[in-house]
Image (tube, coloured by chain):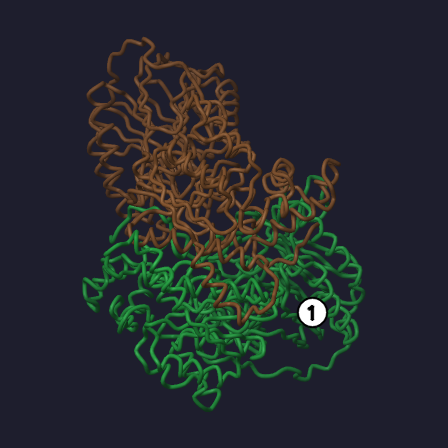
Chain colours: A green, B brown
């Protein structure tokens, strides 16, 4: 029996039910027109993901159930699988697993909800807090369409060791598995996904339809990357990454297996009054193609930036351009996200700014075709110093004076933001944010931190990638090749306060991503003792700064935000 | 059989194992000296609570297990119950419930760990994230000392409907229950606790030893308030709130019940080679006494402030004194927490500051005996305005200019902080933080927000309470009686932008604490439609500000911090 599938890899909007409904309805309409048999939407498609504590609002849950009802009346010809938030009270009829809230998938056919699957495996680590809201389901579903059977699961369900897919395949005699996702991007995630899907499809002898959402929510990037695997572990379809992609695929399944399924292990739901359309099975999709790593990261940053700006109703952004690599890359990403006419840059020199910084900022803004406003901080800085003189007396210049400069700049950017409604993008990278090499309320002031999860060494790689793509030095070579400096005092270099970035980043990756201890890192015999202890101390002591930093885009497994929840107050030092 | 109990309501330090070990050892020594039979320490006493993602560090877990081992060798005469983090690998011998991390209690006697109870009920709501780290235990323990039996549980275990205490009492035939806690304070929590303990002790016919930790961690205040209930539901002992309190109590139990316990339901652990000491059972503790609500809240704020300052190694604090009620109360609390010589106040007037503000600030600082530094922002503000003139041209005065003033003040406070190592206390209250009536990087700049969870109307109540306690107007009456103003423009009043605070606070409580929707609130027919929608919109739109706000002290059930995790990006508007 030939079945036509539509995988709706769409960009949804947390809490914006009208927006999500319109998008879903458009696809359902298309599905009716082109005779799709099974149309699949992502995990929690109706609410967007993750809605966090909006889930504590009763009306939010009711609204989401109302939308589900509306959607079900639109499903006239096709079978629709869609993620939503299920609220079970005592009187519920469909799959009543006890009262509570569930992360669920509805199976809709003939304008009716035929079954509701409640997610069994709830992730509660890294960025995930699903056990804060949801109860785990228990029943494992297998859907039967005239003898063709498929298992249904949600995201985490395929990642756990004792995945329900094995019960579905063994006891439910399934032909294919549908797994709907809200699966966040990080570097190497794609490899983890493909090797998992390879394993599961070959082990279960099932086709797998892996559908992921696309779009960003407060810096969590969902990259799409939906895939179909055949029952031999081979990927036969790969959707685009970082953009919407509605994919059709026709596959032929042989009905009429003689094996019975085990009713103790699974819920078998027969959708009997459903007639599949007639389809040719010619190949109607492109070969799987995926981006190389640098391009992948860069695109994640573009999507993360764009979605934050648009979904928060901003039109234009402003950022401080220092002549350094971080602000240059932030500007380039902003331009790629929302266009050069919507990006304003501010050059705010002090007595410590070099001539070359201004030249570099000018060159860059010219290359990017963005407005550059020059507004020196000198007079204001001078006034501050005079006002503080009676109190600071002869105390030596120290980080106080450096921070004053940075905070004047923060104040300037925020004034433009307040006056003209621009979003301020901050430009700090992960190496700086990890070590606290940044001024709270200074260069950390702003609504969104584009490079917050990008180590300095990767910032350089991305600059080179972007230049290669442009075919010329879009980011001027002088910016890439000069020694990094905050230019907050005479002849300052980052290496005055920090180890060289290639060393620093290696230690940070071990300490932050790999959860290595001081002893673990020293055992590698790759780093100097004093440097390692310095770096770890810097990370531990700057937690209070990160707690007040703007959200940024997650591109690693352990971003500095909801991935990493360290106490500020801690007596745990250098172990 | 007479048993002497020692309840160690102590203040522990997250991650500071040496500190915690010293404190615990001191009490164990005392217990040996005064012939205590059973000494009880709080939940996760060894690590402090909550250690958050420190729990992801392997060495942190190992260190905690090493400390447990050390403690066990010190338990020569008494039985010790103590909370720690249990790591079970495949080879573990004691109560192996599968490999993983558990929130556990050790029962130590004769220098040996006799049993490890793994917490069954893990809270994962409000401030709690225990399912992020821990697996739930399954086995329900009953400890037998020469025929006297007790059930052991940890915190949440007594709060759930099907609490293990009922199995312990019914199938384990227990005489008393020991429940160790890290239970955060909020208004009314005490009533919830006492009514729960009343119910459980009378229903199970068991004595209950309820031990809570005391101290604050990043603004979560553990208030102690440990209690002992007899088997008729009567409180017979109540420890102090908000301070350490080591309590001894001698109780007489009759051994030799003939009923058998059910081994399928419970783990029965006999501690046979233990000899209780001889005790007189005269009453050796005070009658239960608890604080009235305002005093309770005020003491929570003192403890929250003090512990944050001390545990983060600060000696002195600085804050901006505006002449208003919020900064006045913040100063008073700081003085009560760390003494007047450690509190520095900064009065930073602008052209919009009234004469009376300065008088009030002076009067207050005189009453509190704190240093008052006067440092006008006028020259700096003027320089900013001149610098912005070419860009802002003839655009009208708006929140931009207001925010510039607030941010100059933020910059000044931070400069003092950087130069002299003071912690900056912010002064905003919960009404302001909820509605976003505060300037990011301005009055929100600082390390710790004392009144973050205190509604404006409660701030006034606390001022009156503090004055009554002082016996005179410590907080000058002129500060309490004047109309609140941010003084950021001519003749400004808070009521220009916000509803009167008594109305505002009522709506905020409904929307934030009670999770009411717009429709729910309107259904009460108590408020004007436009006011309700305005307030809700203000709350929803200022999430981005709260995300960058400093931590503050939790005193309500739903503080603005880890209690309330709302998305910044949200299309869910006024439902």
Q: Check the residue under mark 1 and report the chain it is in.
A: A
In the drawing, does residue B294 fall left or right of residue B536?
A: left
Considering every residue shown, the one lying at the far front of the view is: B355
Residue at the far bottom in the pictured view: A471
For disc 1, the neighbor class at 10 Å (few under 14, some 14 to 19, many from 20) is some
The answer to whether residue A569 of the structure is visible from this angle is: yes
Q: Nearer the viewer, residue A49 or A459?
A: A459
Left or right, A114 with respect to B305, comes to: right
Q: Residue at coordinates 68% horizontally, 44% vertically from top-left?
A: B517
Q: x, y (%) of residue A336?
A: 54, 78
Q: Is residue A212 visible?
A: no
Image position of A505 with respect to B203: above or below? below
Residue at 31% in and 64% down: A510
Q: Does A54 appear above or below B521?
A: below
Task: Please say if B485 is above or below B164.
Answer: below
Q: Quadrant of residue A31?
A: bottom right
* Image position, residue A519 (x, y; %): 22, 58
Q: Position of residue B158 (x, y in %)?
A: 48, 30
Q: Nearer the viewer, residue B4 or B13?
A: B13
Q: Quadrant of residue A240?
A: bottom right
Which residue position holds label 1? A255
Mark 1: which secondary structure? loop
Q: How many marks?
A: 1
Screen quadrant of the N terminus of chain A: bottom right
State the residue in front, A544 or B3.
Answer: A544
| The quarter of the displayed image where residue B458 is located | top right
Is residue A402 rendered to the left or right of residue B563? left
Tell me: residue A270, above or below residue A458: above
Q: Position of residue B250 (x, y in %)?
A: 32, 14
Q: Nearer the viewer, residue A99 or B366?
A: B366
């Amino acid at each position: 029996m030939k079945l036509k599938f539509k995988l709706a890899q769409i960009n949804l909007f947390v809490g914006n039910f009208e927006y999500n409904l319109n998008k879903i309805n458009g696809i359902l309409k298309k599905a009716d027109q082109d005779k799709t048999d099974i149309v699949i939407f992502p995990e929690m498609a109706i609410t967007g993901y993750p809605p966090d504590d909006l889930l504590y609002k009763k009306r939010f849950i009711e609204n989401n159930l109302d939308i589900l009802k509306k959607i079900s009346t639109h499903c006239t010809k096709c079978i629709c699988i869609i993620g939503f938030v299920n609220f079970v009270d005592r009187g519920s009829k469909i799959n009543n697993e006890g009262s509570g809230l569930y992360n669920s998938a509805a199976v809709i056919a003939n304008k009716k909800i035929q079954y509701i699957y409640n997610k069994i495996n709830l992730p509660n680590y890294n960025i995930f807090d699903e056990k804060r809201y949801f109860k785990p389901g228990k029943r494992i579903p297998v859907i039967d369409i005239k003898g063709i059977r498929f298992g249904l699961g949600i995201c985490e369900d395929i990642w756990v060791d004792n995945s329900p897919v094995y019960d579905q395949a063994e006891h439910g005699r399934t032909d294919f598995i549908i797994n709907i996702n809200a699966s966040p991007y990080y570097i190497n995630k794609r490899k983890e996904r493909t090797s998992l899907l390879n394993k599961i499809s070959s082990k279960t002898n099932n086709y797998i339809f892996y559908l992921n959402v696309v779009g960003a929510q407060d810096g969590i990037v969902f990259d799409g990357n939906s895939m179909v695997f055949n029952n031999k572990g081979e990927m036969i379809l790969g959707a685009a990454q970082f953009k919407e992609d509605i994919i059709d695929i026709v596959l032929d399944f042989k009905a009429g297996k003689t094996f019975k399924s085990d009713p103790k292990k699974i819920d078998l739901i027969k959708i009997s009054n459903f007639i599949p359309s007639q389809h040719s099975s010619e190949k109607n999709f492109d070969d799987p193609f995926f981006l190389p790593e640098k391009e992948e990261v860069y695109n994640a940053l573009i999507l993360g930036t764009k979605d934050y700006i648009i979904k928060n109703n901003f039109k234009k952004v402003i950022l401080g351009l220092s002549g350094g690599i971080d602000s240059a890359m932030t500007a380039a990403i902003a331009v790629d996200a929302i266009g050069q006419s919507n990006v304003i840059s501010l050059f705010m020199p002090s007595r410590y700014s070099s001539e070359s910084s201004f030249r570099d900022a000018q060159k860059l803004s010219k290359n990017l075709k963005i407005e550059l406003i020059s507004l020196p901080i000198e007079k204001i800085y001078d006034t501050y110093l005079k006002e503080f003189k009676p109190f600071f007396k002869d105390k030596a210049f120290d980080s106080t004076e450096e921070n004053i400069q940075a905070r004047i700049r923060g104040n300037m950017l925020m004034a433009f933001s307040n006056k003209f409604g621009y979003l301020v993008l901050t430009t700090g990278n992960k190496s700086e944010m990890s070590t606290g090499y940044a001024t709270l309320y200074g260069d950390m002031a702003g609504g969104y931190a584009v490079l917050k999860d990008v180590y300095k060494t990767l910032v350089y790689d991305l600059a080179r990638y972007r230049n290669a793509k442009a075919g010329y030095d879009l980011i001027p070579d002088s910016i890439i090749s000069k020694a990094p400096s905050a230019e907050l005092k005479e002849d300052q270099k980052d290496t005055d306060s920090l180890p060289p970035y290639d060393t620093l980043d290696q230690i940070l990756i071990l300490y932050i991503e790999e959860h290595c201890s001081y002893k673990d890192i020293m055992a590698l015999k790759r780093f100097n003792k004093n440097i390692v202890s310095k770096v770890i101390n810097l990370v531990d002591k700057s937690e209070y700064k990160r707690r007040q930093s703007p959200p940024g885009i997650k591109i690693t497994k352990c971003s500095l935000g909801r991935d990493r929840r360290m106490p500020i107050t801690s007596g745990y030092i250098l172990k």
